[in-house]
Each structure stands twice: as C-alpha cells, then as structure tokens.
DNA sequence: TGAATAGTTAGGCAAATGCTTAACCAAGAC
DNA sequence: GTCTTGGTTAAGCATTTGCCTAACTATTCA
C-alpha cells in the first residue's frame, strides 16, 4: 500500500514538470537519444539526465544503451496506472453525483420553494 | 498554449503529493469540511489549508463557505483533463507500437536469424 | 593514435515545498 | 457577553527541486 503510494508520488511528480511532459510528449512520437531530448528544451545535458532519471524511477520511461548512445522509450503501462487512479476517483464521484441527482429529482417538488437560489 | 501548460503543471503537481491525493480520495466519496480533511492526515489545519489552496487553483477542488464551515467538493472536469493528456500520449505511442509490430511481422523471416536475443 | 561526440558525475546555488507554531477573526452555543 | 469551534494569516525553517558549470569517461571517426 505504501509502495503503491510512493509509486504514484513518483509518477505524478514526474508528470508535474513541463520539461518532463515535453520529453514524454516527444517520446510518445518515437524513441530518442538523450541529446535529442535535450535540444528542444534549451537546458543542459546534465539537467536533462536528471529529468530522465526521474522519469526512469517513476517507470514512465525506459532506456537502453548501445555504444555511446542511450535510447529512451516510453513505457505506457506506468501511464496507464496514473490514468487509472484518476479515473477511479472521477468515476466514484460522478456515480455519487448521479445518485444525488436521482434523490433530488425524487424529493424535488417539496423543497423547490424553500431555496430559490439553487 | 502556455496557459494550458501551466494548468497541467498545477494539476499534476497537485496530484503529486500523497496527502493531497488522500484529500481527493476522500472527496471522491463525498463532500467534507476542512477539519474533516485534516483529521486523517495528521497534519495541522494551516498545512491542510495550503494543500487545499493548491487543489483549488489547480481546479481539482471547489469550496464554498456557509457560516463558519468551508465545504470542499471534487471537480471532476479537471481530473478529466489530466486523464486526457495521459491518454493521448499513451494512445499515440501504442498506435506507433502497433505499426512497428506490423512492420516487424512483415519483415520477420529475413531478420530472425540475425539477432536471436530479441 | 588523437580529435570529436555522447553521456556521466560532482558540487553548488537560488527558488519552491511542506510543514510548524503563534496570533487572529468570525460564527454558534451557553 | 463570553466560551468554543472552525477557519485563516503570518513568519520561519529544513528539505527538495531544477538548474548551472567544470571535470571526467567511453565510444566512434580519421
């Protein structure tokens, strides 16, 4: 449970930075080297590597090195986990809202004159 | 465009903290006052208010005050936006993977003996 | 071999985060 | 009125972030 929590922490934290989202965006269109990822961001290579390390420990990106080039790949299963967490909360709340709506519709005629600002 | 970016920054940043996710989790099950949100977290009321301010500016939570009680509500449309961002990247990458799969299947017989570790 | 390229590590620094306590205001209960 | 409850503001502090430059290693090219 705590592990799950830490995993989500890392994942959402990784997504909470515009540069890192740019990297993910780029990687969603295909694999790239570290230098290629750094270029459009206008930051140094070390800075890019730090972002990359975060993306890797969060599970969002995987990398492999062949020769002197490190190639970065998106791992969508981690993305799915983040998506799922959000979706569950949203769905839960919406179903609650639906239930409330039905309740209000049922008891509508009696309360409508009591609070006209609604 | 930059606005969109800043909005996503705030949203994912809001989601990147276990305490704030707990608050959202709680709110997905129903509305709550500030004190009610603070209790299970084991942090002070001011700390809770700071989290709440973040959740509000990120659009994830809305609050209203009646009397001396502030009631907090989940706003799922913001959640949907975060979900959508993730989904787009995931879908894009997966479709790319599918296309690659087809390509590999087509040229499979020729390359299979070249790299047995695959 | 030597030069260029791709990446990596170390150290440092300004800003942002997440918390705290102390003091304060406002609404309801007595 | 005054006590209690719920919330709010201000100030301060340790830690974490996100970046940088400088120095280094490893691979490829000539």
Image: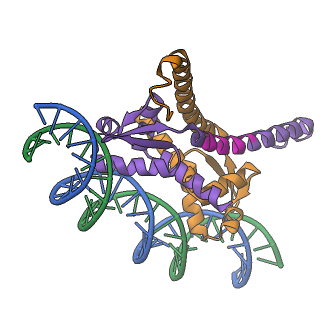
Chain colours: A orange, B purple, C blue, D green
Q: Residue at x 53, y 39 (%)?
A: B75
Q: Is residue B109 visible?
A: no
| Residue nearest the viewer, comparing A12 with A88 | A88
Outermost residue on the top side: it is A106
Q: Residue at x 54, y 26 (%)?
A: A97
| Residue nearest the viewer, comparing A104 with A15 | A104
Q: Position of residue A99 (x, y in %)?
A: 53, 20
Q: Position of residue B67 (x, y in %)?
A: 32, 40
Q: Is residue B111 left or right of residue B55?
A: right
Q: Is residue A4 left or right of residue B88?
A: left
Q: Is residue A13 above or below residue D20?
A: above
Q: Is residue D27 left or right of residue D2?
A: right
Q: Is residue A98 above or below residue A35?
A: above
Q: Quadrant of the N terminus of chain A?
A: top left
**Magenta part mainly helix, strand or loop?**
helix
Q: Is residue B33 above or below residue A27?
A: above
Outermost residue on the front side: it is A113
Q: Is residue A63 visible?
A: yes
What residue span does the magenta drawing correspond to?
B80-91
């Amino acid at each position: 449970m705590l592990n799950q929590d830490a995993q989500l922490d890392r994942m959402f934290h990784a997504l909470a930075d515009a540069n890192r989202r740019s990297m993910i965006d780029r990687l969603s269109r295909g694999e790239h080297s570290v230098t290629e990822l750094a270029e459009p961001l206008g930051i140094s290579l070390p800075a890019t590597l730090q972002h990359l390390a975060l993306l890797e420990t969060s599970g969002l990106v995987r990398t492999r090195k062949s020769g002197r080039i490190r190639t970065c790949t998106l791992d969508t299963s981690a993305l799915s986990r983040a998506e799922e967490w959000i979706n569950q909360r949203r769905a839960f709340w919406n179903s609650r809202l639906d239930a409330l709506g039905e309740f209000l519709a049922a008891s509508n005629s009696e309360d409508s004159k009591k609070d006209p600002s609604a």
